[in-house]
Amino acid sequence: MMIDSETFASLKAHLMDLEEKSMTWHKTMCSNFLNEEEVAQMQVYFPTSNHIVYSGGYPEARKKKIVFRYDEEDDFFDIVCISARIDQRFRKIGHRDILGALMHLQIDRHSFGDFWVADEHIYLYTSHSMADFLCNNLTRINQLSVHFEVLDTYPAQTFQTKIVTCIIASERLDALVAGIAHISRSKAKEMIRQGLVQVNHITLEAPDKLCDNNVTISIRGFGRYKYLGILRNTKSDRILAEIEVSI
């Protein structure tokens, strides 16, 4: 959902304060983990440079910290990955189970980054200051005992996608949302007005905006897609579009 104006202003002010402290104290400062919408919004005001870095622990991370470096040669890094081996033969652990266990500990969502299950392990990114707390207290997920340890490496999550095609009336975003989600154009417009559609992680406000190639479109309740572009026009003068779907 769209960041409300009060939250947006508070986050921006906090980051401006961190940036100022970095320069005043001659010290690298960093934020907590920001979600994709927060990152996209803040990149407008704090663009990547030699002194401003966005990092989530690995290049394709979705949640990231903003690091304000006083010295561009500073190798300060406040992100670590913890991992737990799990046996899923009798009880499956999914993303929702892990998030529920984290919320049960009453910790802020901004205190941890990406997490996922792969190769019978749970991987979770957090800050050095939170790693010990999580290793000591995150000991049970969906009635399964787990034991987390800090890794010396920084594993990357593999995002599974597939390429599909769909027929759309035009490259307007309401038409694209309708085609992707297999809903009516009027329903797509209503979802956009309700703030349920994001383009490159920014909540879409105008349904008549044209879509560029390779933009990410997130539709609440349907999923995440990348619009790859037009393959060809059909005989009925509609568009056969190519879409990358996250699975």
Image (tube, grey):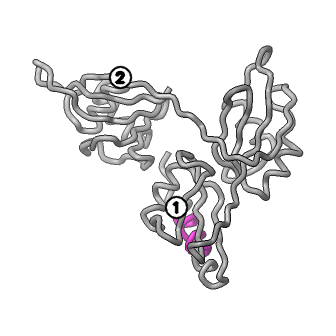
Residue 44 position within the rendered picture, expressed as x and y whole percent measured from the top left: 42, 63
**145 to the left or right of 114:** right
Answer whether residue 17 is magenta in the image: yes
Residue found at x 53% / y 68%: 52
Dot label at residue 8? 1
Residue found at x 67% / y 77%: 27
Q: Does residue 187 appear in this view?
A: no
**76 to the left or right of 142:** left
Compared with 177, 62 (above or below) is below
Q: Which residue is mark 2?
A: 164
User: Closer to the camera, 189 or 222?
Assistant: 222
Q: Does residue 159 appear in this view?
A: yes
- Report the magenta residues as a range: 9-18
Mark 1: which secondary structure? helix
Compared with 108, 29 (above or below) is below
> Which tag is nearer the camera, tag 2 or tag 1?
2
